[in-house]
Amino acid sequence: QEPLVESGGGSVQAGGSLRLSCAGSVFTYSHNCIGWFRQAPGKEREGVASGTSGGRITVADSVKDRFTASRDGGKNTLTLQMNNMRSEDTGTYSCVAFTSTCGGNVRDWGQGTQVTVSS
């Protein structure tokens, strides 16, 4: 099976911005909901955003005032734009493809990309 490929992680100062992109094979994931999870050191994993194949976007309440997401159906990508970042946004961000519905069982995981926000 073809992987989910993440890009865009890195380091940024507090208040800065980063953009993450997850690309999945159109042939494999075009009908799947794709999402982003994150996990900070010592904390539980949490869902950040998801996008259906029809373009319906959901962003977690905890970040929706700073993060936006968009899905490009043609390229089968889910982009996460993170603005006004805070130190608590630091963690490993992982792209997923859900088996059926957004927020349900995960079919596949990406490798994960590190995001570090320094204050």
Image: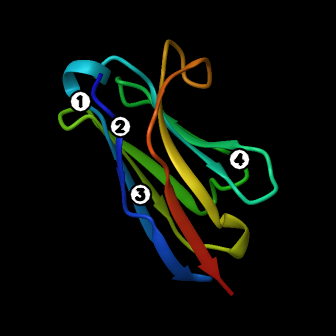
Q: Position of residue 49 (x, y in %)?
A: 55, 42
Q: Let me know if residue 90 appears in the view.
A: yes
Front position among marks 4 and 3: 3
Q: Earlier in the sequence, mark 3 or mark 1?
A: 3
Residue 25 tag number: 1
Element type at mark 4: loop
Residue matched to label 3:
20
Q: Let me know if residue 16 appears in the view.
A: no
Element type at mark 2: loop
Residue matched to label 4:
61
**Amino acid on which the number 3 mark rests in the picture:** Leu
Q: Position of residue 14 (x, y in %)?
A: 62, 83
**Amino acid on which the number 1 mark rests in the picture:** Ser
**Amino acid on which the number 4 mark rests in the picture:** Asp
Residue at 62%, 50% in the rendered image: 38
Q: Residues within 10 Å of mark 4 (few under 14, many from 20)?
A: few
Residue at 54%, 66% in the rendered image: 115
Distance of label 4 from label 2 (alpha carbons): 25 Å
Where 74 sits versus 107, above or below?
below
Q: Position of residue 40 (x, y in %)?
A: 71, 58
Front position among marks 3 and 1: 1
